[in-house]
Image (spheres, rainbow, N blue to C red):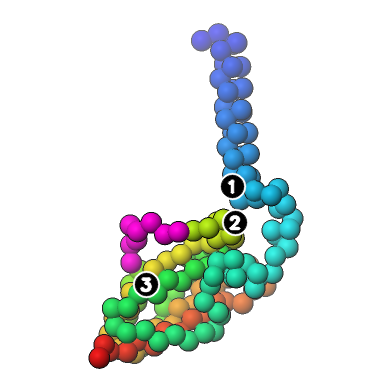
Amino acid sequence: MDSRSGVYVIAGFAALALLLALAAYHVFFRDGDEAAFNALSLEERMAMCRSLPNGSSHEVRTAERLFINLPEDIYPYAHRSFVFEGARAALVPSGEALYIDESFKRGHCVTHLYEFSGEGSVELVVSSARHALPEYRVYVSVVANE
């Protein structure tokens, strides 16, 4: 390979990297207003994700499923923990195609489906990746099927 070929290969990789960066920018900031996105409040981001309210309580029956949606860049999956009292929660691998609109994608939202079993309570706790923001907590009371 001569030196000209090497230059073409490097130029090709640089062009590909630029195209990928532009595509990512287009997907996440379709209107080109990154500063406006970063200025959104936590409440606005949670609304974009259609998150359950922080600190809220929910009642489900055994084997019932519940979607929990959060902005992944603020409340990452790796920061999630559970407190169990008699009941259990399991992440359901979802092969289902979920409808996610543009607002959901722009909010960096991720949805997880949980199935509850037993009787008792489950508390989901997610610490924030941003230290100034509060941790996220949702309480689920699991009752037996009648």
Amino acid at the residue labelled 3? Tyr
CA gap, disc 1 to disc 2? 8 Å
Q: Camera-side residue: 144 or 8? A: 144
Q: Give SS at disc 2.
A: helix
Q: Give SS at disc 3.
A: strand
CA gap, disc 1 to disc 3? 28 Å
Circle 2 residue: 106
The answer to which quarter of the image holds residue 104 is bottom right
**On screen, residue 57 above or below 69:** below
Q: Earlier in the sequence, mark 1 or mark 2?
A: 1
Q: Earlier in the sequence, mark 2 or mark 3?
A: 2
Residue for point 33% across, 67% down? 92
**Residue 125 appears at what percent x and percent y?**
49, 77
**Residue 12 appears at what percent x and percent y?**
58, 23
Q: Which residues are magenta?
A: 92-99
Residue for point 65% across, 69% down? 44
Question: Residue 114, which numbered label?
Answer: 3
Q: Camera-side residue: 63 or 77? A: 63
Q: Give SS at disc 1.
A: helix
